[in-house]
Image: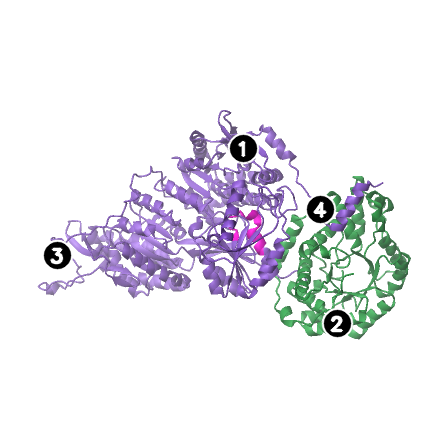
Chain colours: A purple, B green
Amino acid sequence: MANKSKSNRLQEIFDNMEYGPALEEKKILDAWLADHNGKFGHFINNEFVIDDNGKFVDSIDPATGLVLAQTCQGTEEDVDAAVKAAAAAYESWSKLSGHARARHLYSFARHVQKHSRLLAVLESCDNGKSIREARDCDVPLVVRHLYYHAGWAQLLDTELHNWKSIGVVGAIVPWNFPLMLLSWKLCPALAAGNTVVLKPATNTRLSALLLAQIAAEAGLPAGVFNVVTGGGQLGSQLASHALVDKVAFTGSTEVGQLLRRLTAGTGKKLSLELGGKSPVIIFDSADIDSAVEGVVDAIWFNQGQVCSAGSRLLVQESVYEEVLKKLKKRMQQLRVGNSLDKTVDMAAVVSEQQRQSIEDCVNGAREEGAQVFQVDAPTGCFYPPTLITDVSPASACVVNEIFGPVLVAMSFRTAKEAIGLANNSIYGLAASVFSERLTLALETAKHLQAGAVWINGHNIFDAAAGFGGYRQSGFGRDGGKEGLYEYIKPKWQPQLRFSKPDLDLKTFGSQYSADRPSLKPRADAGLATVLASDSSSLPRVDRTYKLYYGGGQKRPDANYSRVLRDPSGLAFALVAEANRKDVRNAVEAAAKAQPGWGKRSGFNRSQILFYLAENLEQRRNEFVDHLSALTGESESSAEAEVTASIERLFIWASYCDKHGGTVQETTLYGTVVRLNEPVGVIAIACPDTAPLLAFISLVGAAVARGNAVVVVPSEKFPSPAMAFHQILETSDVPGGVVNILTGDRDHLCKYLAEHHDVQSVWYFGSLAGSCFVEHASADNVKRTWVDYGQGRDWQDAQQGAGEEFLYHSTQVKNIWLSMGDIYAN
Amino acid sequence: MAERNPGCDLDLAWVENSYINLPSVQRRAATLTSSRTVKKQWQAAWLLRAITCTDLTTLGGDDTDGNVVRLCGKAAQPLRHDISASLGDWTKELTVAAVCVYPSRVPAAVAAARKADNKYGVAAVATGFPSGQYPLSTRLEEIKFAVASGATEIDVVINRTLALLNKWEELYAEVQAMREACGDAHMKVILGVGELGSLTTVYRASLVSMMAGADFIKTSTGKEGVNATLPIGLVMCRAIRNYHERTGFRVGFKPAGGIRTAKDSLAWLVLIKEELGNEWLNRDLFRLGASSLLTDIERQLFHHVTGRYAAAHELPMP
């Protein structure tokens, strides 16, 4: 018969219909921790390496405050050991066939699936996230990335046959998705034939160690995947290690900038996936109830500790009140509690420090007079779902990434205003658009400056679509074919390992200089076409090279000139000496012209580029004469350069409408469109070799893909590029798309690299200049493409016009279009 | 009993400006069940609640008074006596919400219910169930017959033709006439969701039915190809919620068709709790239309009290 108190309790629940706890067991996790006596070393060469005399720190379960285990605080020697293990393993791993690497990754994937619950429970305890999300999101995505990249390992030699692996990858990942984000680095790195040393975040180290152990169980060769644990300093040591060829980082913009500066001038490849303040745009044409659920996914997923969290809610004014009312009601249904409870929507934030930082942001908003709406959360390391209204565009909570479950809401009137507000941010990681009107949603997505745009959803991920940002959200992509480029380099390229050049970053390039008049002019200067042979008694008509920007020839701000000399030292021409004000003006012109140029159809851009080729062909002889007179190269060599330049223009004209993107085969029911969008304004510093061909190869690629450029032609031989401006003008290139500044390359590059409205700098000059450009670009997290003073053969098809050019000319935006209306008859 | 929904004027602008995004709805429906669960005593209590919300249904061409009366016996005593005893004597008083039969079987069901002190209701399907492809006059006659036979609840079907052609004024008028014919009997309006083509139409038909005075809106007859699925239920619950927010009236919800397992019933309870709140978690505002569900619930409760899994023949058949 029934136990009375049990029966009463049953009736009580029957009456109140409350949820009870449903705790996930952690016995197997406890057993794994016990196997290691609760103490973990690094994982190097497929073994746990532990120094009992080393320093250890506690790994804490933030939901309970209990210590899970201890992990060691690595030293520079530990990093060195791990990197050397990876470097040794690289020798054999990189030489394995793609098929062999695919088999390894496939086996790895299988083993991760078989241990998936243990990984999920550990991830939940270590990070504080809910077991449901660890189980249903984090771990399945790790598995998905492994399978997806097993496929790339298999296909790399056929699909990317002009590329090769780089070497040792130093991966540094954050604490919000410790496993998932590490797999985003690890999988493409291994698929491409690199080996990896990973530094997990300080707060969340255990799942990486478990994953490494599983990799070893799955048969991954020793040294291919190593894990070192430690504090932030360890990350810097890893990133600056001489044998590390590539640094892959996900984390804060601040640390990303630090890594950019740290690795500047070393030849290390770098990809950064940084912060965000992603907008969620709700139009009045949305399914409002579903849009509210979209907001839940946007900002309360993983306690809001998501790089792509939709933390800025923009709602059309006509439905603003309705949406906010529904949202507040919905917030009251959110359950916050124990990470291992299967019935919670939100669990613990990662640490007390993080909780405090979120609280400080919200208190700051309160002090500014904003309205803060919150629902209940348990005491401890939990933070409640929070909605902030009555904010101004300049409020800290509107501008700064909070990295917590905190949403700010604002209204807008029109789509144009929504786009304006959405793009009014230093970040550009992700965005979402809610509307049932396809035309509106797609146009909005097109104009949002973000690497991922979800239509009627938010925070949907898959290995087949790259994830990563525009602007200060970083560069490079994790996932998709686009993500592979971060782990490969052109086959022709030698190893790039340089010791950081010794240069004074404060003074580099700051010197403005110009020439004085020369008393040794060349008799035929101004070129034969200008000088009439039968009028030698008359002074020649002067050939003037001004600056060219905004579609016109402009006198340099300072009105100084540079004397070009031919190989015999005779003055050949005077060109303008540009300074920082000319840089300012040229960038302004480029920024103004770029959106319109980028919006033109590829067909239109290709017509213009073909026309450039046509007009260059017409003036072929003039350019041949000009080149050989200026550089002293033979006429046949100059002829070859002009011929190649014309062909380059054909190549880039052809790519105007053949590189727009593709469809990503993700798990979403619908279509994910990858758009290869323009980068924006690109500053280009040309090398002295092949002064016309290099100029055309670089500028052609950039403008073909819709960018506007501010280009500094060869410092030594700038006049052919300056002469080319007439061809630009006669070929219908809109003003401001190509802007040419002559003068001191490093001086101009200093101001270009420091200009915040320049999105990328391509620098072909010295190692010191490369170092400077990379370093200065950290401030607004520009993309860079530098040659470390190495030079290249511009006549070579790969070196002068390989896929690398297209990669640097575009940034990938993935638009997620879910589909579906049919469910029955 | 809560105050009945009197309906309101047809608000065509509201109806026609509503859109439903299916992928979003599917995502929400999927996380509803993966983010909520009830275990142990909570599961037992919730299953008992599910029993009390069940409309135990037989709608066969081969129904006779014999099987209908047997069904009524199950309605009055849904659990094997020893399982009830183990759970606590209070559970012996629990019955289903109603039995649901064709109009011709109503007299037998009413007689059986009377013997059980009318602890459960008798619902009749009507209005040309399941297709509704009959003249309005005969459809209304069916309601009147069932009410006169003692049915306390009438499950009417809407005219899907009108819904598919967006003839909302006509649909509104028909449902209003049905409500009038029901009199004091509560009216559940079956949308026949499997024949409405899009969730937007489901949502609009839900609104129109409520505006015309439905006491409940119900997914399906059980005879269409697609019946009660969580995404559909989610959309109908949102319609109910939005109608309540605008008018202040509470309309009940009844999923029917394909609900067979205890787990299914818990998923529906979770949906109601999350989307409409605890106020809706009772038989006045929530019904589960089902025929074989009770047996699976009983099996789970058997396990709850004994720790063992039951054989099918150990559980009383309806």
Quarter of the rendering containing residue A679: bottom left
Query: Mark 3 vs mark 1: which is more N-terminal?
Result: 1
Q: What element carries label 2?
A: helix
Task: Give the amino acid type for the residue marked by disc 2 in the picture.
Answer: Gln
Q: Name the residue that disc number 2 marks.
A: B176
Residue A133 visible in this rendered orientation of the protein: yes
Magenta-colored span: A294-310
Question: In what quadrant of the picture does the N terminus of chain A appear?
Answer: top right
Q: In the image, which disc is placed on residue A616?
A: none
Q: Does the magenta stretch include residue A308?
A: yes
Q: Name the residue that disc number 4 marks.
A: B38
Residue A815 visible in this rendered orientation of the protein: no
Q: Name the residue that disc number 1 marks.
A: A58
Give the alpha-carbon distance from disc 2 to disc 1, as whole Å: 68 Å
Contact (Cβ within 8 Å) of mark 3 with mark 2: no
Left or right placement of residue A782 versus residue B146 in this view = left
Q: Provide the chain ID for the residue under circle 4.
A: B
Query: Picture coordinates of residue A483 (x, y %)?
Result: 47, 47
Closest to the camera, between mark 1 and mark 4, is 1
Give the alpha-carbon distance from disc 3 to disc 1, as whole Å: 79 Å
Q: Provide the chain ID for the residue under circle 1.
A: A
Query: Picture coordinates of residue A482 (x, y %)?
Result: 46, 49
Left or right placement of residue A285 versus residue A159 in this view = right
Residue farthest along the top direction in this orientation? A53
Q: Name the residue that disc number 3 marks.
A: A523
Q: Provide the chain ID for the residue under circle 2.
A: B
Contact (Cβ within 8 Å) of mark 2 with mark 1: no
Neighbour class for label 4 at 10 Å: few (<14), some, many (≥20)? many
Give the alpha-carbon distance from disc 3 to disc 2, as whole Å: 102 Å
**Whether marks 1 and 4 lie on the same chain:** no
